[in-house]
């Protein structure tokens, strides 16, 4: 197996282990890790969901102006949705990570 591929998989494996341990022992890594884990999952959902819709807009047969306005509108919509989750948890990093 290629060592570069193994090295590239280390962050994903570490995140997976963190989620697995947090599932069975929510405070094993501290009192706030569960909150970060939930925000990470919400951020991942929004990124995957928005990327599909933004790709659809980019591929649509529309004017350049129409595409730009649609992308700006969707970006604002998803930002507001993510901001609601971020504010409810008292964190701003999901907004910056999204953009």
Image (cartoon, rainbow, N blue to C red):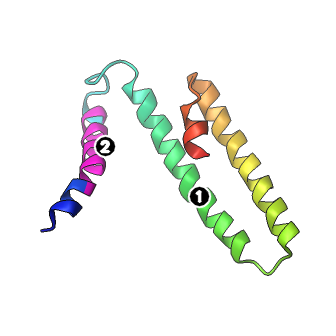
Residue at 63% x, 57% y is 50
Secondary-structure class at tag 1? helix
Residue at 53% x, 51% y is 45
Residue 60 appears left or right of 42:
right
Coordinates of residue 30 in the picture (x, y in percent): 32, 19
Coordinates of residue 33 in the picture (x, y in percent): 37, 27
Coordinates of residue 37 in the picture (x, y in percent): 41, 35
Disc 2 target residue: 15
Which of the 4 image quarters holds residue 96? top right
Q: Is residue 44 above or below residue 60?
A: above
Residue at 19% x, 58% y is 6
Specify the label residue 49 is tagged with: 1
Residue at the farthest left position: 1
Instruction: Say which of 78 and 25 sits in front.
Output: 78
Query: Magenta segment, which residues?
Result: 8-22
Coordinates of residue 10 in the picture (x, y in percent): 24, 49
Q: CA distance from mark 2 to mark 1?
A: 21 Å
Q: Earlier in the sequence, mark 2 or mark 1?
A: 2
């Amino acid at each position: 197996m290629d060592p570069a591929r193994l090295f590239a998989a280390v962050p994903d494996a570490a995140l997976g282990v963190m989620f697995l341990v947090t599932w069975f022992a929510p405070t094993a890594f501290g009192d706030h890790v569960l909150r970060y884990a939930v925000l990470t999952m919400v951020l991942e959902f929004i990124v995957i969901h928005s990327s599909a819709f933004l790709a659809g807009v980019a591929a649509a047969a529309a004017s350049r102006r129409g595409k730009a306005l649609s992308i700006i509108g969707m970006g604002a919509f998803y930002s507001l949705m993510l901001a609601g989750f971020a504010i409810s948890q008292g964190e701003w990093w999901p907004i910056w990570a999204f953009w």
